[in-house]
Amino acid sequence: MQKPTIQDVARRAGVGVGTVSRVLNNHAAVRDTTRQTVLGVIRDLDYTPNPHARRIAGGKSYTISVLLPVVTTEFYVRLLNGLEAAFQEARYDVAIFPLLDRARLERYLGSHTLAYQADGLVMATYNLTGMFSENRLRDQPTVLVDAYAEGVDCARMDNHLGGVLAGQFAAQQPGFIYAIWVETELDQMFTSRVFEERRSGFLQSLAAAGRALVGESLSSFDAQAARTAAGQLLDHAQFPATVFASADLLAGGLLDEAAARGLVLGRDLKVLGFDDQPWAQARGLSTLHQPVEAMAYEAATLLLSRLSGYSGPPRVRTFEPRLVLRASTGDM
């Protein structure tokens, strides 16, 4: 059988080819009843648009560039899943550009690079406020995810609130309070504010409760480094102790080190993480849950609305973490 064409869809739906094209492109200028009719015909005919013809006809790439720090950590895998879910629904492809260093960021932002041949741009996590205030970005629809800057659409997590919640919990526990932080870049433009905000909220809560942070340690975002930092902290810790790890990856190192030393979780040592990664429940890790996929999906939706013609003021969508207590803090 011959594959159905866009003309077949238009004929069956009783609309013009241009209307079918607008539905495929998720354009806002289509009545909902018409959109549903066209989508129903597309399903009935099992019609799949030709991506090459679509690009040529529309003068668009139907590709979104995603610039993010790394692609191998659980957080960014989840972030990409959320972004891709929304973009695929709108029939956009995703091109990933890892920002491993400042030089690569500078290269990606060059006017002739592949990243700028996409229809829209997603930038994740890094503190790029200066790039927007200096107008260093071209006039291209852009959204920030897991980050904030004035004058641009953003979907962000309230990491300061997460730190506050962690501090309030730690302040209620008996014994001594410690923390392990993710070490961030010295270059302020190439820095994530995420961990700084978590630390600020945590210390604010402790101060408000009249509790002191007895000791703290730094670790790069690496499992082996986290285990080493955990060992160094526990070498000098007094027990019972509560430790806030500013990312679940660091908390995992603490759990491993505690087990190796025969420490009893919930009695000798209480461990609280941040992220609620997929493995956290299985390991009984108490943590701050953040809806990563939902945040990413919302960021993609903001960008898609720009591509569909929205030209209003910048929008900020803020997501709140919530405390999830498990065995690592003595809660079952």
Image: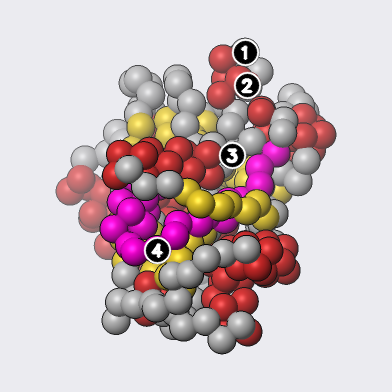
Label placed on residue 134: 1
Alpha carbon separation for disc pair 1 and 4: 48 Å
Residue to which mark 2 is pinned? 131
Q: Quadrant of residue 74?
A: bottom right
* Discs 2, 4 touching: Cβ within 8 Å: no
* Residue 176 horizontal/vertical position (percent): 44, 60
Front disc: 1 or 4: 4
Please tell me whether mark 3 sits on a helix, a strand or a loop: loop
Q: Residues within 10 Å of mark 3 (few under 14, many from 20)?
A: some
Q: Which mark is residue 19?
A: none
Within 10 Å of disc 1 (Cα), the crowding (few <14, some 14-19, many 20+) is: few
Q: Label 2: few (<14), some or many (≥20) within 10 Å?
A: few
| Residue appearing at x 34%, y 64% in the figure | 174
Q: Residue under label 4, please give it.
A: 175
Q: Tell which of 240 and 17 is nearer to you.
A: 240
Dot 2: element: helix
Which marked residue is nearer to the observer: mark 3 or mark 2?
3
User: For numbered disc 4, what is the local secondary structure?
Assistant: loop
Q: Considering depth in this image, is 55 or 329 the residue closer to the camera?
A: 329
